[in-house]
Image: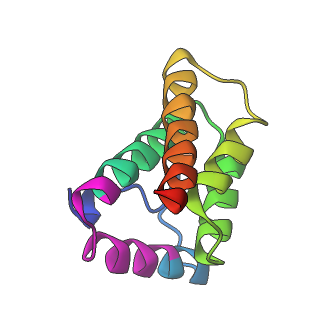
Amino acid sequence: MSLNDFIITNGSSEKSYLNYAYRSLLMNTINTLDEKSFERWETYHLIIDELSKEGHDKAFKEIKYRLTDDEYPNDVFIDVLSRVELTPLLVFLQRRVEMYVEDDILGRFL
């Protein structure tokens, strides 16, 4: 997966500070991924792709804002997905993110 695989903007390719910050976040993150984190970011990408296809532009923008503000990605995606109408794919992906949260909690104690 490379930066070109990620959706930076939806609709018009407006140049904004948010898009610049989001692109920078993705570049920095992708370059330092281990295998476990790589799988997570693939899941995040699939969620964003599905949200874009379903026309949830505000949800995508909110994700960009919150991720660039250093919020924990799993919390961001769970919160955003709780407020949109879920397709079967989004239901599946939401469960995966919930599994990541459980893995992180268990990882703190093991």
Q: Position of residue 90 (x, y in %)?
A: 55, 27
Tell me residue 12's x, y (percent). 51, 58
Q: Residue furthest top?
A: 88
* Res 69 → quadrant: bottom right
Q: Report x, y in % for residue 78.
A: 67, 43
State left or right for residue 91 relative to residue 59. Answer: left
35 with respect to 92 (left or right): left
Residue drawn at point x = 45 percent, y = 41 percent? 49
Q: Which quadrant of the structure image shows residue 72?
A: bottom right
The correct choice, above or below, for 56 with respect to 92 in the image is below
**Residue nearer the viewer, 57 or 32:** 32
- Which residue occupies the foreground of this view, 52 or 68? 68
Model colouring: rainbow
Magenta part mainly helix, strand or loop?
A: helix
Q: Residue at x 53, y 58 (%)?
A: 109
Quarter of the image for the C terminus: give it: bottom left
Residue 34: say if magenta: yes
Left-right relation of 18 to 42: right
Q: How many marks?
A: 0
| Residue 4 at x, y percent in the picture | 25, 61
Residue occupying the point 54% across, 15% down:
88
Q: Quadrant of the N terminus?
A: bottom left
Furthest residue in direction right, as rendered = 83
| Residue occupying the far front of the picture | 110
In the image, residue 49 above or below residue 37: above
On screen, residue 9 above or below 21 = above
User: Does the magenta run of residues contain 14?
Assistant: no
The magenta stretch is 22-37
